[in-house]
Image (spheres, rainbow, N blue to C red):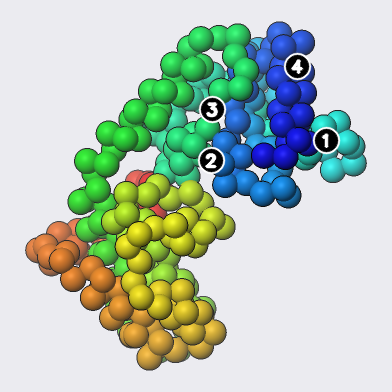
Amino acid sequence: MTKEQSETIRQIQLSAESDLSILGVILCGSLAKATGTAQSDVDVIVVVSDEVYDQKKVNKDFFWGTDFDNDKFPVEVDGKIVPKEFLEKVKIQGNESIKYTLYFSEVIFSRDSEIDLMLEEIKSSIKNGISQKDMKIKKFYSMMKSSRFSFESESDNTFLKHKLIHDTVYYACRLILTMNDRLFPCVKNMFKEIETCGRVPEKFFSTIDRLLLSYSEEALRIFYDIMDNFSKNIHFDNRIRKGYVIENELFWFHNIIPFYFI
């Protein structure tokens, strides 16, 4: 962490101390995870009182930090304003990207001890969630397989065929992360996270590059075969696999949250 980044965090703490509506500030992002560079901004979640949050919600003003045209802090600050209730909701129904953010985070200011406790409870719930690993592996494998073989049934729909290729890659990546006991950070950081995994198929990234350059069935087959061989120990009833696929499709008809949002 650079001197400028450290000074920015200090100024954030001072700013929060002088604003009684701020209940706590949580440092997250690359600096909290200790993977930041000298160019990294400071990502924070700012927990405010319900009254202030309700006011912010009216104007959809959820940003806290450095605007594009000012230099309030030495380093750019990207802050999100949330109510304390947000942390409770994350623990119960938060998706993996949000949980990933909070798992690698720390409270840098608090005037409410419940915030510290709630963050620790979220981290504990994430650790306990490893018990769902087998189910998640089967689901992502099922969706990857479904996307790959759906490609063959689409002859003239270029848009859909390209989407099915992207879906196959996406589910393959989620499968690798799950098999390595990693949370899904977000799409833009997915490859970066996979690069830190211990178990990754050989030539994984170069094969993806070839696939996304050609969008060909041959390249898709090669990629899928690599992933299928990597996942060769996954065996379960084909009816269960179809059930996972149908569950995902039910989103369109019954407003069920699709599995790829988890």
Q: Is residue 41 visible?
A: yes
Residue type (three-letter) at the residue carrying disc 4 = Leu
Q: What crowding class fits label 3: few (fewer than 14 Cα within 10 Å), some (14-19), or many (20 or more)? A: some
Q: Amino acid at mark 2?
A: Lys
Marks 4 and 3, the one that precedes in the sequence: 4
Q: Which residue is mark 4?
A: 14
Numbered marks: total: 4
- The answer to which image quadrant residue 82 occupies is top right
Secondary structure beneath disc 1?
loop
Whether residue 77 is visible here, answered yes or no, is: no
Q: Earlier in the sequence, mark 1 or mark 4?
A: 4
Can you identify the residue that label 3 sits on? 106
Give x and y (percent) for residue 84. Answer: 54, 19
Q: Earlier in the sequence, mark 1 or mark 3?
A: 1
C-alpha span from label 2 to label 1: 20 Å
**Residue 74 numbered tag:** 1
- Residue drawn 15% across and 59% down? 240
Spatial separation of the CA atoms under disc 3 and disc 2: 9 Å
Identity of the residue drawn at 25% across and 56% down: 137
Classify mark 2: helix, strand or loop: helix
Assess disc 1: are there few (<14), some (14-19) or many (≥20) residues with their C-alpha within 10 Å of its C-alpha.
Answer: some
Q: Where's residue 176, x and y in %?
A: 34, 61
Q: Which residue is mark 2?
A: 33
Q: Residues within 10 Å of mark 4 (few under 14, many from 20)?
A: few
**Amino acid type, callout 3:** Glu
Q: Earlier in the sequence, mark 3 or mark 2?
A: 2
